[in-house]
Image: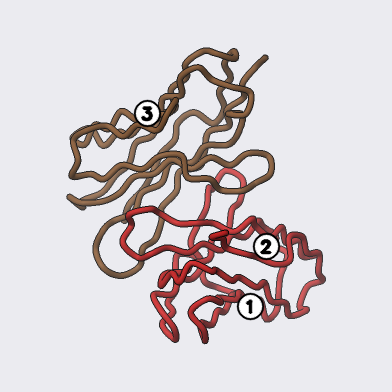
Chain colours: A red, B brown
Amino acid sequence: EAQVTQNPRYLITVTGKKLTVTCSQNMNHEYMSWYRQDPGLGLRQIYYSMNVEVTDKGDVPEGYKVSRKEKRNFPLILESPSPNQTSLYFCASSLGTGTYGYTFGSGTRLTVV
Amino acid sequence: AQTVTQSQPEMSVQEAETVTLSCTYDTSENNYYLFWYKQPPSRQMILVIRQEAYKQQNATENRFSVNFQKAAKSFSLKISDSQLGDTAMYFCAFMKTRFGNEKLTFGTGTRLTIIP
């Protein structure tokens, strides 16, 4: 089944403790992206990747890192999480033509206390 | 920069009725894509329908159809014969077609409740 797999689904952590949210897709998509969803703000892009070793900032990149060492994987790293990073996070992938939009993962609910 | 506006934070309709969700956008691009995504309580983001700006014909997917008015920069979603399973948050999104960051710019969403 074609899908984007995100883990974990829920995560509660403490301020400053490094964490990684994993994302993997099995559709051989070139484009991958991370979004965060906050009430009243919709979804906003954090980082994106056009291919292996090609990544760039989206609209709200501060406090986040990403890497794209393999085409299928695109982890999101929070090196020193803060409470304002409490949010719902989505990984998404695309063929790269806009034809079908993005396929989204099931989301990660992150709480930073 | 592109912006997407959904002016109806919440709506509710009776089951089997027709409902229209509004979306307007602002862009200087001539070619782009527009999407409606559905987010049920499971929080999964599900693509409902897509429209290519250079196509004049409005997209249709079963009970879902759009009214795309390019000059007015309007992209509304009509749900016919609404069902309980249509209860969800609906997001309108914009994507420009130039090579590069295929960013989706989202509106703030409309929470739709279908009443039995």
Where residue B21 sits, quadrant-wise, is top left
Disc 2: which residue: A84
Pointers 1 and 2 within a single chain = yes
Q: Mark 1 lies on which chain?
A: A
The location of residue B60, given as percent across then percent down, is: 35, 31
**Type of the residue with mark 1:** Ile
Disc 3: which residue: B65
The location of residue A42, given as percent across then percent down, is: 53, 48
**Type of the residue with mark 3:** Ser
Is A27 located above or below residue A75 in the figure? above
In the image: residue A93, left or right of residue A24? left
**Type of the residue with mark 2:** Asn
* Residue at figure coordinates x 44%, y 86% from the top left: A53
**Which quadrant is the C terminus of chain B positioned in?**
top right
CA neighbours of label 1 inside 10 A, class few (<14), some (14 to 19), many (20+): some
Callout in the foreground (2, 3): 3
* Residue at figure coordinates x 52%, y 52% from the top left: A43
Secondary structure at badge 2 equals helix
Q: Distance between the residues labelled 1 and 2?
A: 15 Å
The location of residue A56, given as percent across then percent down, is: 42, 77
**Which quadrant is the N terminus of chain B positioned in?**
bottom left
Q: Which chain carries label 2?
A: A
* Residue at figure coordinates x 47%, y 45% from the top left: B47
Is A85 located above or below residue A73 in the figure? above
Question: Residue A16 or B66: which is nearer the viewer?
Answer: B66
Residue A77: image tag: 1
Q: How far apart are marks 3 and 1 (CA)?
A: 39 Å
In the image: residue A49, left or right of residue B33? right
